[in-house]
């Protein structure tokens, strides 16, 4: 299975990332591909296609465009990619712990019925009685299901699988639930399931930005177009401020041409949106959750932990630049 080859971008000199001063949400390239229903579920492991597709630049998180309801600078970041196994959960946990190491107040939310994030902190989703399901569907306060582990964790249980149906017409459930605790955190990271269904839509509606982990090995640019199309629809109807804030290349193996090509293709198409930090491939990321811990706790001085610290620094720097610009605007 080879990497998807891209057509050269039309207009050659056109930058992959558009200037950020335009308030109009950018539309995806392929209008006919825009979905009409809010639910765009994809199979977890969509067969890769060698098909050549033009790629839309995801809209950039526009400077100063995401005021939080309480007027705080809390960032709510959805970690999303409808493909499974790209390191959404690994990134949610390790990025969350890295952010908390530098003094930020962090909440991570498990919105995946598989409960991998919950498990990765040593909790068993099969025996959890109250979870994000009850928060979203029965409107119990989110504070009641938050566990204090390496960082605060809003847990998932197996019954979250039933939430997709229960959430029809309730795209704002997560946004509403977060209002209670939002001001208590600097970063809220939401781990989403491998689909673009209503759980993920809820995350997009609540989010100030989306980070897309992309596995270098099986780069699915078609998948990124689908994700951006869904986001465009959310922007149009539910949350005008949400956009892709960054793309993080995961499972990078610098020794293979394959991985290096994947990075090249990502940067060619998404430019500045691709974080400088590469998350390298190492078995440490699989070992740590078995011990119920992040890689930062499991192997604090290792390269795997350092990679997520570096990613956290990039994300914090971007936030501070944005907050600074916002403050100057209001001065
Ligand atoms: P997702 O949440 O997108 O399905 P996961 O975070 O669960 O993906 O990661 C899928 C699998 O890959 C897990 O077993 C995880 O431990 C492993 N993994 C994640 N990141 C890396 C990495 N950088 N190198 C090697 N394995 C990784
Ligand atoms: Mg996951």
Image: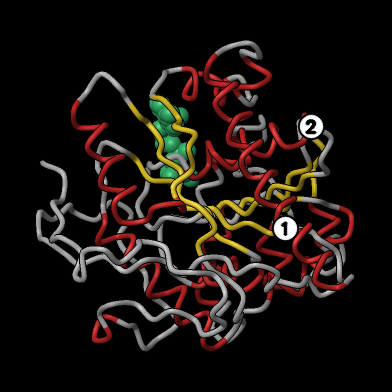
271 relative position to 29: left or right:
right
Residue 248 image point, x, y percent: 46, 43
Up-down relation of residue 300 to residue 267 (above or below): above
Q: Earlier in the sequence, mark 1 or mark 2?
A: 1
Name the image quarter holding residue 148.
Answer: top right
Q: Which of 13/213 is in front?
A: 13
Q: Nearer the viewer, residue 260 or 70?
A: 260
Residue 102 image label: 2
The quarter of the picture showing ligand 1: top left
Residue at left 59%, top 65%?
203
Q: Image height check: is 8 above or below 309?
A: below
- Which residue does the numbered mark 1 point to in the structure image? 75
Q: How many marks?
A: 2
162 or 328: which is nearer to us? Answer: 328
Identify the image quadrant of residue 222: bottom left
Q: Quadrant of the N terminus?
A: top left
Residue ID at (60%, 62%): 209
């Amino acid at each position: 299975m080879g990497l998807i080859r891209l057509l050269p971008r039309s207009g050659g000199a056109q930058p992959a990332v558009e200037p950020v001063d335009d308030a109009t949400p950018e539309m995806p390239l392929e209008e006919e591909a825009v979905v009409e229903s809010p639910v765009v579920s994809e199979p977890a492991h969509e067969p890769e296609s060698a098909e050549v597709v033009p790629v839309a630049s995801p809209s950039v998180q526009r400077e100063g465009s995401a005021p939080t309801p309480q007027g705080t600078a809390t960032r709510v970041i959805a970690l999303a990619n409808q493909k499974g196994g790209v390191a959404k959960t690994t990134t949610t946990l390790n990025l969350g712990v890295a952010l908390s190491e530098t003094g930020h107040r962090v909440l991570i939310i498990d919105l995946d019925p598989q409960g991998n994030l919950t498990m990765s902190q040593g909790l068993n989703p099969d025996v959890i009685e109250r979870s994000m399901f009850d928060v979203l569907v029965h409107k119990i306060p989110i504070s009641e299901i938050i566990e204090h582990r390496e960082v605060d964790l809003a847990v998932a249980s197996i019954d979250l699988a039933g939430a997709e149906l229960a959430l029809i017409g309730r795209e704002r459930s997560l946004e509403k639930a977060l209002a209670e605790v939002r001001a208590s955190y600097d970063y809220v990271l939401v781990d989403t399931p491998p689909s673009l269904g209503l759980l993920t839509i809820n995350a997009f509606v609540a989010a100030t930005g989306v980070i897309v982990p992309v596995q270098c090995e099986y780069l699915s640019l078609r998948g990124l177009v689908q994700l951006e199309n869904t986001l465009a629809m959310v922007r149009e109807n539910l949350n005008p401020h949400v956009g892709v804030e960054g793309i993080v290349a995961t499972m990078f193996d610098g020794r293979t041409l394959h991985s290096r090509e994947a990075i090249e293709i990502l940067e060619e198409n998404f430019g500045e949106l691709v974080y400088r930090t590469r998350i390298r491939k190492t078995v440490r990321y699989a070992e740590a959750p078995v011990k119920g811990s992040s890689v930062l706790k499991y192997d604090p001085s290792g390269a795997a932990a350092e990679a997520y610290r570096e990613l956290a620094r990039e994300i914090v720097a971007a936030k501070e630049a944005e907050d600074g610009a916002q403050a100057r605007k209001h001065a």
